Amino acid sequence: MSHLKLLAATLKWNGIKLLGKQEIGRRIFLHSQRYASSGTSEPFLSGSNSSYVEEMYYAWLENPKSVHKSWDLFFRNANAGQAYDPHLLDQLERKPSFLQSHGLAQTPAKAEKLVEDHLAVQSLIRAYQIRGHHVAQLDPLGILDADLDSFVPSDLITTIDKLGFYGLHESDLDKVFQLPTTTFIGGKENSLSLREIIKRLENTYCQHIGLEFMFINDVEQCQWIRQKFETPGIMKFTNEEKRTLLARLVRSMRFEDFLARKWSSEKRFGLEGCEVMIPALKTIIDKSSEMGIEYVIMGMPHRGRLNVLANVIRKELEQIFCQFDPKLEAADEGSGDVKYHLGMYHERINRATNKKITLSLMANPSHLEAVDPVVQGKTKAEQFYRGDTAGKKVMSILLHGDAAFAGQGVVYETFHLSDLPSYTTNGTIHVVVNNQIGFTTDPRMARSSPYPTDVARVVNAPIFHVNADDPEAVMYVCNVAAEWRNTFNKDVVVDLVCYRRRGHNEMDEPMFTQPLMYKQIHKQVPVLKKYADKLIADGTVTLQEFEEEIAKYDRICEEAYTRSKDNKILHIKHWLDSPWPGFFNMDGEPKSMSCPPTGISEDLLTHIGNVASSVPVKDFKIHPGLSRILKARLEMTQNRVVDWALAEYMAFGSVLKEGIHVRLSGQDVERGTFSHRHHVLHDQEVDKRTCVPMNHLWEQQAPYTVCNSSLSEYGVLGFELGFAMASPNALVCWEAQFGDFHNTAQCIIDQFISSGQAKWVRHNGIVLLLPHGMEGMGPEHSSARPERFLQMSNDDSDAYPEFTEQFEVSQLYECNWIVVNCSTPANYFHVLRRQILLPFRKPLIVLTPKSLLRHPEAKSSFDEMVSGTTFQRVIPENGLAAQAPHEVKRVIFCTGKVYYDLVKERKNQDLEKQVAITRLEQISPFPFDLLKEELEKYPGADLVWCQEEHKNSGYYDYVKPRFRTIVNHTRPIWYVGREPAAAAATGNKNMHLVSLRRFLDTAFNLEAFEGKTF
Ligand SMILES: Cc1ncc(C[n+]2csc(CCOP(=O)(O)OP(=O)(O)O)c2C)c(N)n1
Ligand SMILES: [Mg+2]
């Protein structure tokens, strides 16, 4: 920052090169021209300027002494002519003779200049508030510009000649100016000399803190920030606070040193260069605890994670150290994860406030920023269950790396959830470890925005950049960030501008790619030493005290290290971030291995059906089309049948009665993409008046949340996964608009849903509803890609299982997720209820129908849902073919909607005796037991798998080896369906129908496979 000369030094009278008179004249001319040429869009004295003059005027009217004497003179002169009319000021610019023509003829030119100068000073103040951060000294190394630009804004007075920009001159430096109410630099003074004004602005905006907040379109919030940073002397710390800060820096630094000494060649993604992050987090937590926060949920990447576990969460050090032991054995609890990904949950007393605080660090994958929405969802859920609607008890903190924060789109998606009623967590504190590098990539190659934090501007979050080598500035900023969240319940970003002392990890050589930066880093005095020297110099601590503090912590580490050698087995469950007290037994196992029947009493079905058909609020006018839909629901209820939507209603409604919260989130889920659901009724006459009948089922029921989400899959699915993590007693469903779109959330599916339990031993019962089906709607509205879910299913295709009594449930317990494609509303009802009745939680992937929502055949009777009934993993053939199985020539196995096409075709071809059609409703885990029975029932039949999807998609690759395992490779399982294809479906309607016709013909051509070998 060599361009920045502090004004204290620059603005001395002596040594200032005086500007020539001509030059001054030219600048003033240019200056007034600039104002004049801005025309109507920025009139002189318009907007905040004119309101400033108005403000002065009214203050003067009340008490002429309250304003500076120059204003007094101006208004006295003006008033001598005629009463002051603020609106007339607008016209000043357009008519320079205006003053004269409105009775201000006597206004001396001097007074006019004074007004101009005051306005100029106001602009100057504003310039610092808006752009001061561009010249703030943020980089501890002093070599980079945090905003990637060494340009100095022309309206900041970095050298004396720049006063001319405002038509001011050095001779104005000692003139006193009235301060506008939009600044607090005066403290108790309401006027200051220009010299002092500039000095104070420099101090506030151009030192080690760079403030970006003037884009916030709320005056009160801007004022709040200005007051927090501009007030003279506001950044003060007691000696006690300074000593605490030093002690925290000692811990942060010595922890990394300890690991480096003991395991010099182990990856740990050390925090060196940003040690201040530990005291920063602790400050945020202390301050938040002081203001009433009881539970902090954190998400963070690799950098400094072990340090956070040790020194913020306070995980026992020996538990951390033992993980470096290569001989540590894994307990039999899943495949686990590397040490810098594991989560943690810890309740303790906050030393600063003496209040209880719970801290949870969420486990996360390597995929940077993926955990952000998950943390938000979990935070929302914790707030929800505590009735903490304003986020006063539970809050989230997200940590980010500079490269990831700028580069990963999910950051943006997460920000967009921050202010939505059903997704807000009432403000998140974001802390960026901005070490000005991402692995080996320079920020200039990694982002197009000036700062890595610009993404936060979309939600009007203030951004506090701070030089991480100034620990007191960092603490101050963190305190303000916590207060900001508590005051406005909005997001805020703390950007710790720092460096990375070593390579990306401890094995990397950074000099290959960043030679100059690292030469500077090698010279850099560690922050702990710098701060200790400062405190020792000013007498806050003695050298001896400092050294004792270090020795004390080193001893703690050594002792823990010795104890760590006793740990021979790693239990991942000790690293669980979201325990569910009482849900499992003492050993963390399910309390049983059985699931009660999922049917419910007829009375309940009728009651829910009636409410689902009604408008339970008085004087509420619904759309006539909707009246017809509700009427049809009532008729169905009276006729004891359900369609898809009503079955879902029954499932949700019945678990609500049992105290289970239900949350359904996704794009347009309230009505339903296919206009079948209508869970939120809208009054046609009163704007925004809505009613959710599901919340009117019983007086004592759990709440139902149904919410249209932002147009995001990655962010929203991550959020719902996090929501589902908080409690086992909730049915949390995310619905894709079409199943095809789920792949923009692929990372959440792969890294969390599929593998979360294996890596982090935590259960999750999230339900994914994925509309799926080949209906000629083109390549992106047809397939939820079941093959991908099935490929990631962990049940072994070649292992013939042992069929114990508990097979059905224990198979569910062993699997990583459940994939179903129900062909009847009743089965959909049962599978949703089973999700809750199971003694453990597993993600459930449901391929849901589109045309079946209204298919006259796709209805279920109450008989299939009443008490005693249950989910059918397989629906066997139960028609003519099943009555004489030995005569059956072919058994077609299928799943989902194609069943209805097959049944219709079979009837058309009059093959009901020859061809059996059996539906696989639960595809994974594979119902080996039931299918075995089904296969044995038809010993003389061909076995066919029929699907409407292309051969390289759908289910075939999953079911084929499993069928073969059942028959011990003695019978072939033939494929009938569409040919392999690159796209999920054709865009041509005709081609769609032709291919359908073709595979239906093959399905019922009983000679199709004659003579073929397998
Ligand atoms: C989504 C994703 N892409 C790529 C990577 C590989 N990767 C790991 S760390 C890293 C650099 C991260 O830089 P930054 O966010 O600045 O954090 P830092 O390591 O500097 O603290 C990259 C690219 C990853 N982990 N996740
Ligand atoms: Mg970085």
Image (tube, rainbow, N blue to C red):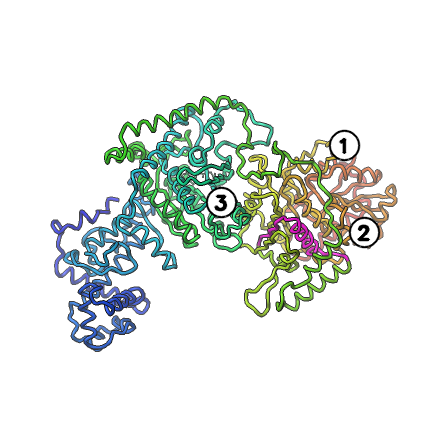
Dot 2 surroundings within 10 Å: few (below 14), some, or many (20 or more)?
Answer: many
| Magenta highlight on residue 655 | yes
Q: In this rendering, is residue 132 above or below 244? A: below
Residue type highlighted by circle 3: Asp
User: Does residue 267 appear anywhere in the picture?
Assistant: yes
Of badges 2 and 3, the one in the foreground is 3
Q: Which residue in the structure is indicated by mark 2?
A: 906
Dot 1 surroundings within 10 Å: few (below 14), some, or many (20 or more)?
Answer: few
Q: Nearer the viewer, residue 975 or 537?
A: 537
Q: In this rendering, is residue 729 above or below 50? A: above
- Which contiguous range is marked in magenta? 640-666
Q: Secondary structure beneath disc 2?
A: helix
Query: In this rendering, would 542 be left or right of 961?
Result: left
Q: In this rendering, is residue 547 above or below 696? A: above
Q: Are marks 1 and 3 in contact (CB under 8 Å)?
A: no
Q: Tell me which numbered mark, 2 or 3, is placed earlier along the sequence.
A: 3
Q: Residue furthest front?
A: 354
